[in-house]
Amino acid sequence: MIAWQDLWAALALVLVFEGIFPFLNPGGLRRILTVIDGLSDRQLRIMGFASMSAGLAVLYFVKH
């Protein structure tokens, strides 16, 4: 079972990692967001599913 402290630590790390790119390259982030804005809902769902799957795979290998 996951401890609440682990969950909060994981969420804090997500915020840290999500803040790195806009901090280092705000112009690049704007260009990427423009590209993302042009994607269809289906493409975004596929990207989201791939991201979740990769995250679950990494989590599985780290925890086992």
Image (cartoon, rainbow, N blue to C red):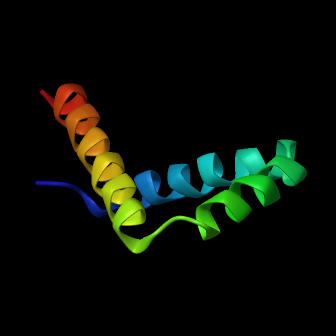
Q: Position of residue 26 (x, y in %)?
A: 86, 53
Measured from the top left, where is residue 5 in percent x and y?
A: 36, 58
Whether residue 55 is situated above or below residue 63 in the rendered picture: below
x, y percentage for residue 4? 30, 63
In this image, 55 relative to 64: left or right? right
Q: Residue at x 19, y 55 (%)?
A: 2
**Which residue is more in the foreground, 51 or 15?**
51
Q: Residue 61 vs residue 12: left or right?
A: left
Quadrant in which the N terminus is drawn: bottom left
Task: Write the residue at 24% across / 57% down.
Answer: 3
For residue 61, above or below residue 24: above
Residue 45, percent across and down?
Answer: 34, 65
Q: Nearer the viewer, residue 46 or 53?
A: 46
Q: How many marks?
A: 0
Quadrant, the C terminus: top left
Q: Is residue 7 left or right of residue 34?
A: left
Above/below status of 34 relative to 28: below
Q: Identify the residue at horizontal 40%, vertical 73% (top origin).
A: 41
Q: Is residue 29 left or right of residue 13?
A: right
- What residue is at 52 percent from the left and 53 percent from the top? 14
Q: Nearer the viewer, residue 12 or 30?
A: 30
